[in-house]
Image: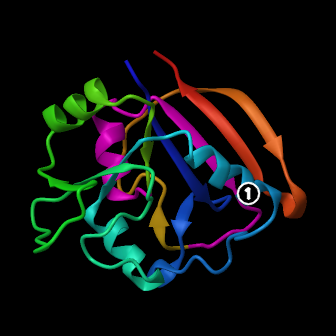
Amino acid sequence: MKKIIYYVASSIDGFIAGKNDAIDQFILQGKGVEKYRSDLLKFDTVIMGRRTYEFGYKYGLQPGQAAYPNMNHYIFSDSLRIESLADSVHIVNSSIAQVKEIKANSKTDIYLCGGGDFAGWLLDNALIDQLKLKLNPIILGEGVGLFGNSKTNAKWQLIEKESFDGGLQILTYDREK
């Protein structure tokens, strides 16, 4: 079975975005970001919550369009309504059964884009298999937490560490069973 991989930028203090969803303090270019973009080409499926999908609107994403042209999109939301969806964009109800079905049918590992509350819900239900943190050398103090408000306790094993200019690191963890 394919893995759900939460591949996300984080501050040292565990925020994936700052106050008002700001991402301007994160490293947005360089070899580490190029590595991330290259890694995304390996996925044919992306899952995300409504807030993450709508976040893309700030950067030119049109409602109903694919954020990643090479991937099938599954947006988990019980409230999002969009009239016209691209063939690769699907809005699905938030259910564990839906996640498991996508996981069973994906040809590649699955990219969990963004997170916060959605990633916390997946963590709470033991549905994240791997964590790839683009750890940025910043402290934000507030914002969107890596796992939202989840209080789940889980152990992870570091399996790879890559360092890049500017202090960016990509840390890969597998969930301990």
Residue 116: x, y in percent? 39, 58
Q: Amino acid at mark 1?
A: Glu
Quarter containing the N terminus: top left
Q: Horizontal placement of 76 versus 61: left or right?
A: left
Magenta region, residue range: 114-141
Outermost residue toward the front in this view: 87
Neighbours of disc 1 within 10 Å: few (<14), some (14-19), many (20+): few
Q: Quadrant of residue 56?
A: bottom left
Provide the residue designation for mark 1: 34
User: Which residue is at 48% across, 40% downward?
Assistant: 43
How many dots with numbers?
1
| Pick the front one: 83 or 129 | 83
Q: Tell me where residue 34 appears, x and y as whole percent.
A: 73, 57
- Identify the residue shown where x is 42% and y is 41%: 44
Q: Locate residue 98 relative to residue 36 in the image: left or right.
A: left
Residue reaching furthest to the right? 165
Please name the residue shown 61% across and 31% down the image: 173
Height in image: 59 above or below 109? Answer: below
Residue 117: x and y in percent read 32, 57
Vertical position of residue 61 compared to residue 71: above or below:
below
Along the line of sight, the residue nearer the viewer: 126 or 35: 35
Q: Quadrant of residue 158?
A: top right
Q: Residue at x 77, y 55 (%)?
A: 32
Q: Secondary structure at mark 1?
A: helix
Left or right of 168, for residue 173: left
Check residue 137 for magenta coloring.
yes
Task: Locate the C terminus and report the quarter of the image it occupies.
Answer: top left
Question: What sort of colour scheme is used for the picture?
Answer: rainbow
Q: Is residue 15 above or below residue 2?
A: below
